[in-house]
Amino acid sequence: MYWAVMLAALLMASEPLCAGAWTIPHGTLQVFSGAVSSHAHQRYDGTGKLVGPVFFNKLYFQNWMEYGLTDAFTLIAAPQYITAKSSNDKGLLQRFSSPSLEAGGKLLLSRRFGMLSLQATAKAAGGFDMSVSSSGESGRQIELRLLYGANFKFFQRDGFIDLEAGQRWIQRPRPDEMVLDASMGWWLTRRNLILLQSFTAISGKGPRWPYEPYCQVKLEGSMVHRFTPRWALQSGYFITAAGRNTVKENGMVTTLWFRL
């Protein structure tokens, strides 16, 4: 769920290993490969109140790959696989597993005041690789996203921010979505990066049964350790801090970062 919207910039020596608003140099390949293990024992009802109990478990294998076709245009491919268990309203345990694929590109618009870029992707996914799912059904979506990134210094150490806003047009009966994501990273040491992120999805008008208007806000904190200029490992934890008509999903994140 997370690496298709990965908001990170890892400065490796004089060149950045980055996603988010940053495009990458011509001929460069970078890959984020990892797993997310999550669960939920409560859900947010239509008023945002926590109710339960519910049962939900998910294991998500994710890959986010970028290739610099030119210095200003980056190709994107994100093959993923998910397996999940969930109980329905009658308490019946359901199991789901499916692959998914997202692909598209990112165009650099300006670097005058930071990095401003436009990203477009199309995705075909299983049920629990979408923001919400009523019975594990698959779906398709097209996403257009505006991204802004900038570097800063704090206590003489490098940091960055990445802000993203997007619109998703999703196959019915799911409603369309607006997404608002943000990241901030700061180098605690030369090899260790602190990364704080938020991911927000808000449903649009006209949801069809069995879907209702929903929203969710997920917060994630992680540490990225750089082993070499090409390899790094991210380890973190996320929570669903607020929501409406969605489960309160919490989980662990582990991701290997590579650049060639």
Image: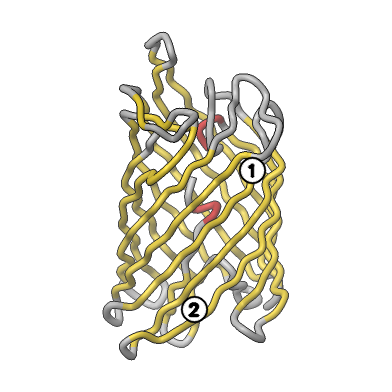
- Tell me residue 57's x, y (percent): 36, 30
Closest to the observer: 183 or 45?
Answer: 45
Q: In the structure shown, which secondary structural element does the residue marked by tag 1 occupy?
A: strand
Instruction: Please give left or right for residue 83 compared with residue 113 in the image.
Output: left
Q: Residue at x 42, y 60 (%)?
A: 197
Residue count near mark 1 (Cα–Cα under 10 Å), binned few <14, some 14–19, many ≥20: many
Instruction: Please give left or right for residue 213 compared with residue 11 in the image.
Output: right
Residue 18 in the image: above or below residue 92:
below
Residue type, mark 2 in image? Pro
- Tell me residue 170's x, y (percent): 69, 38
Q: Which residue is mark 1?
A: 177
CA–CA distance in space, label 1 to label 2: 31 Å
Q: Residue at x 71, y 45 (%)?
A: 142
Q: Residue at x 47, y 32 (%)?
A: 47
Please state which of the two labelled residues, at mark 1 or mark 2, is closer to the viewer: 1
Whichever of labels 1 and 2 marks the residue nearer the N terminus, that label is 2
Residue type, mark 1 in image? Glu
Residue 84 in the image: above or below residue 157:
above
Q: Which residue is mark 2?
A: 16
Q: Residue 54 got which mark? A: none
The part of the image, by quadrant, that contains residue 204 is top right
Q: Are marks 1 and 2 in contact (CB under 8 Å)?
A: no
Q: In the structure shown, which secondary structural element does the residue marked by tag 2 occupy?
A: strand
